[in-house]
Every structure is written in C-alpha cells, then in structure tokens.
C-alpha cells in the first residue's frame, strides 16, 4: 500500500470513528449485554446469576401472561395493520385531487400522526369514557345505542370484550403518516399512463388495479414493513389508558416486558422477552421481504431484464 493510500485509509477511518464509537457504545454493546442478561436471573441490586435458557423456557411454556400478551399483540397487529394500510391509502387517494385548498386538508389529516403519544392516549381515554366520552354521546345522538334502566352504555376500554377493538379503532388515528408516503407515491405516477388507459376505454377501477396499485407497490411494501414493526411495539397507549386491563385484555407485549423489567425487576426475564420479540418481528419482516418478489413492481428491474 502506498503512502497516499494509507493516508486516505486513515482519513476514512477517522471520519467513521465517531459513528463506530456511538454504534458500539449505544447499540452493539447493549445488544451483547442483553443476550448475556437474558440467560441470567438479575434484579439489578444483586449480581446476575447465570440460569441458561430458563428465562426463555419460563416465558414460552409456563407463563400464561406471556401467552396472553403475545395473543393480544398478534390479534391487534392482524386487524390494525390491514385497516391502517387501507385507510391511509384511501385518504391519500382522496387527498390526491387537484382541488383548491387541498394543502390545508392534507395538513389537517397529517397533524394527528405527529402528536405526542401521551397526549393522544389522554385524548382517546376521554373519547372512550363510557359516562362522558364523546364517542358514546355521538352514538347516542345517532340512535345506535340507548341508555336507560338496565341499559348501560358501552364501556369501551373498561369492557374486556371491547377494550382491544377500541385500541384497533384508535390505531386509525395515526394513518396520516402512511398517507403522506402514499401521497408521494401517487404523485410520482406518470399521467401519461392514465391518459393511455383512458384512450383504451379503461374505467376507474381498471386504472386503479392495473396502474395505481402496481406503480405504488414499493410504497405499499415500505408501509407494510414499517407497519409490521410498529404494530408489535404498542406501549404508550396501553400504559396510559388501561395499564394492561381489564382482565389482561390490553396487556400488550411491550407493556408486559416493561412490567417485568421495571415493576418486578426481573431484568433477565425481560431481556429474554425482548429477544423473543426481536425474532418474531424479524420472522414476519423476512416473510414480507420474501413475498415482495411476487407483488412489488420495480421499473428499474424491468429495465435491467430487457
């Protein structure tokens, strides 16, 4: 290696040195420590005691609350994820029209997505309140529910049967984030494609199915991956609104992990739960990536095959 090459290599190393230090100190190091702690019994105060895979065995085969938390989280993801994808796409299509004042409408729909999670949780706790919440008042005015002797209004997050559906409904509050990404994808579609389809006599549904969906399939893929990751990490809303109740109906995975770590001080068990969640999210994400070759359209790939 020449002197100039060595100098360039040293300069390059110095440029990435801050990132290497930060990555090692705040990402790689904690991950390695977490793997070690997941195989220990550790309450923070006393030194960690090595127990092998006992934490994983306890979580997977002997802890009914772990199974309950996993079931709640998977059920939530199964409903909230597709509803969020379809809802944000529908809103993006509506807001992709060339109408006066559309910028204001886009801003209004996007604002809920950037509100702090704690404020959103407090707001929805009031909306779902069975006594003075705006949701029951609205349904009462529409005549969809009635209140009287022997007839109680829906309890929503206070009712074990309605608590999880309430969280799924609340998840639609944040579709503005996906809407913005869909909107960017919709506006990148060349108008010549629609003009050519109209000349051929295509109707709205045919243009949507044959042009819009394939052209924004990379955007759908991105939102799907981010949605899978996000739907398995619900914490703030359940922590603020229900603390996992009633009857464990909203005991989401991350909330139970938090309780094990910072209420019961079972750090080893919580670390094991974190790694199980990591594997679960990784598996689901890899499934999405594996299937993407069948339904995601990349124009560059088509050009490369020509």
Image (spheres, helix red, strand yellow):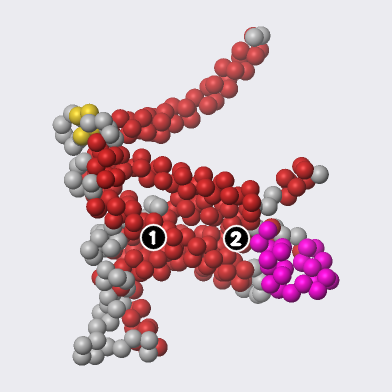
Q: Is residue 197 magenta?
A: yes
What residue appears at the point 36 percent right and 42 percent down from the top-left corner? 276
Q: Residue 57, how many percent across, how many down?
A: 27, 40
Residue 150, x across and y down, in percent: 21, 88
In the rendered image, residue 155, in percent from the top left (x then y), is placed at: 27, 75
Residue placed under numbered mark 1 in the picture: 75
Quadrant (top left, top right, bottom left, bottom right) of the N terminus: top right
Q: Is residue 235 visible?
A: no
Task: From the viewer's perspective, tell me whether residue 229 is left or right of residue 36.
Answer: right
Q: Nearer the viewer, mark 2 or mark 1?
A: 1
Which quadrant of the rendered structure holds the C terminus?
A: top right
Q: Which mark is residue 151?
A: none
Q: CA distance from mark 2 to mark 1?
A: 25 Å
Residue shown at 30% from the left, 61% from the top? 250
Residue 150 visible in the current orientation: yes
Using a 10 Å C-alpha cutoff, classify the residue at mark 2 as few (fewer than 14 neighbours), some (14 to 19) or many (20 or more): many
Figure quadrant of residue 27: top left
Residue 142: give x, y in percent of width and height: 40, 88
Residue farthest to the left, as pictured: 46
Which residue range is magenta in the image? Answer: 192-214
**Which residue is the site of mark 2?**
182
Residue at 28 percent of width and 47 percent of height: 257
Q: Residue at x 80, y 71 (%)?
A: 198
In the displayed structure, 264 sits above or below 234; it is above
Q: Nearer the viewer, residue 96 or 224?
A: 224
Residue density around tag 1, few if under 14, some if 14–19, many if 20 or more, within 10 Å: some
Q: Is residue 275 left or right of residue 52?
A: right
Q: Is 158 placed above or below 258 here?
A: below
Label 2 SS: helix
Task: Point out the tag, 2 or 1, that comes first from the N-terminus.
Answer: 1
């Amino acid at each position: 290696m020449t002197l100039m090459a060595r100098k360039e290599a040293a300069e390059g190393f110095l440029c990435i040195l801050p990132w290497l230090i930060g990555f090692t100190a705040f990402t790689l190091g904690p991950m390695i420590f977490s793997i070690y702690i997941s195989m220990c019994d550790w309450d923070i105060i006393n030194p960690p005691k090595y127990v092998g895979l006992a934490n994983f065995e306890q979580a997977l085969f002997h802890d009914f609350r772990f199974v309950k938390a996993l079931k709640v989280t998977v059920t939530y993801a199964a409903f909230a994820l597709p509803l969020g994808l379809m809802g944000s796409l529908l809103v993006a299509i509506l807001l992709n029209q060339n109408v006066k004042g559309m910028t204001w409408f886009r801003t209004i729909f996007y604002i809920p997505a950037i509100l702090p999670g704690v404020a959103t949780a407090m707001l929805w706790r009031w909306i779902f309140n069975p006594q003075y919440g705006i949701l029951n008042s609205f349904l009462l005015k529409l005549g969809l529910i009635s209140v009287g002797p022997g007839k109680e209004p829906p309890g929503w997050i206070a009712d074990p049967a309605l608590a999880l559906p309430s969280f799924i409904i609340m998840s639609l509050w944040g579709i503005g984030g996906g809407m913005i990404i869909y909107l960017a994808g919709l506006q990148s579609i060349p108008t010549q494609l629609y003009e050519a389809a109209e000349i051929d006599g295509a109707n709205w549904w045919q243009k949507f199915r044959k042009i819009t969906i394939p052209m924004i399939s990379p955007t759908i893929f991105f939102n799907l991956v981010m949605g899978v990751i996000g739907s398995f990490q619900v914490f703030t809303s359940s922590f603020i609104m229900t603390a996992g109740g009633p009857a464990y109906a909203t005991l989401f995975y991350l909330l139970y992990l938090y309780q094990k770590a910072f209420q019961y001080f079972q750090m080893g068990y919580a670390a094991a739960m974190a790694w199980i969640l990591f594997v679960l999210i990784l598996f689901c994400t890899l499934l999405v990536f594996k299937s993407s070759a069948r339904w995601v359209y990349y124009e560059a790939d088509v050009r490369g095959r020509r």
